[in-house]
Amino acid sequence: MRKKNTVQSRIFFTKERKIDLHDLEELCDSVGWSRRPLRKIQRALKNSFIIVSAWEIRKNQRRLIGFARATSDHAFNATIWDVVIHPRFQSQGLGKGMISYMIRHLKNEDISNITLFADPQVVDFYCRLGFVIEPEGIKGMFWYPN
Ligand SMILES: CC(C)(COP(=O)(O)OP(=O)(O)OC[C@H]1O[C@@H](n2cnc3c(N)ncnc32)[C@H](O)[C@@H]1OP(=O)(O)O)[C@@H](O)C(=O)NCCC(=O)NCCS
């Protein structure tokens, strides 16, 4: 009788800050985001308050499958950016788990105001996590160079 190929895999979240920029670029490519200069990404990571990532371990190999980061004034406010789960791992609760993990750590740092900018197609994803659209009518405003 042939043995079933049951390679075990494990997924975990971490706050470890060391992320290979090419792995991150590959992850962002996988969801169709446009590329940004790696040196600017590197600077953005360096200046982020918390970086969270999701990894799959399979046959002793580690693979980056999720990412999010938050910037902060280290006192009152934090803003979450660049939330992504690799398409092969979506719809399994990992995005929810990763953002909950981020929120837990921001709360531990005594940050009470957590904001983000949601793409229209993911608004409900964040609402399910407790985020509120325009609380008390507050509007997000943007300025772009001409
Ligand atoms: C958005 C994203 C991070 C969600 O990750 P995910 O691992 O697929 O989400 P989860 O499986 O944890 O879903 C959690 C809940 O949100 C819901 N959900 C997930 N994606 C959703 C979406 N696009 N719209 C509405 N609800 C969504 C799920 O149904 C689930 O609901 P439940 O708790 O009632 O079961 C992922 O789809 C992604 O990386 N998308 C591409 C990049 C992107 O758009 N990032 C956000 C930029 S603002």
Image (cartoon, rainbow, N blue to C red):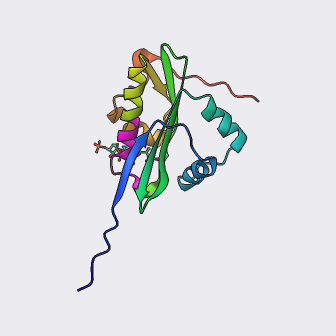
Magenta span includes 57: no
Residue extending farthest front: 60
User: Magenta stretch mostly in which secondary structure?
Assistant: helix
Residue extending farthest left: 1
Residue 2: x and y, percent?
A: 27, 84
For the C terminus, give its image quadrant. top right
Residue closer to the observer: 104 or 114: 104
Can see residue 66? yes
Residue found at x 62% / y 25%: 142
Magenta-colored span? 89-99
Question: Going by the image, does 130 lie left or right of 119?
Answer: left
Residue found at x 67% / y 24%: 143
Residue closer to the observer: 120 or 33: 33
Residue 76: x and y, percent?
A: 48, 13
Please, is residue 137 above or below residue 128 in the view? Answer: above
User: Ligand 1 lies in which image quarter?
Assistant: top left
Residue extending farthest right: 146
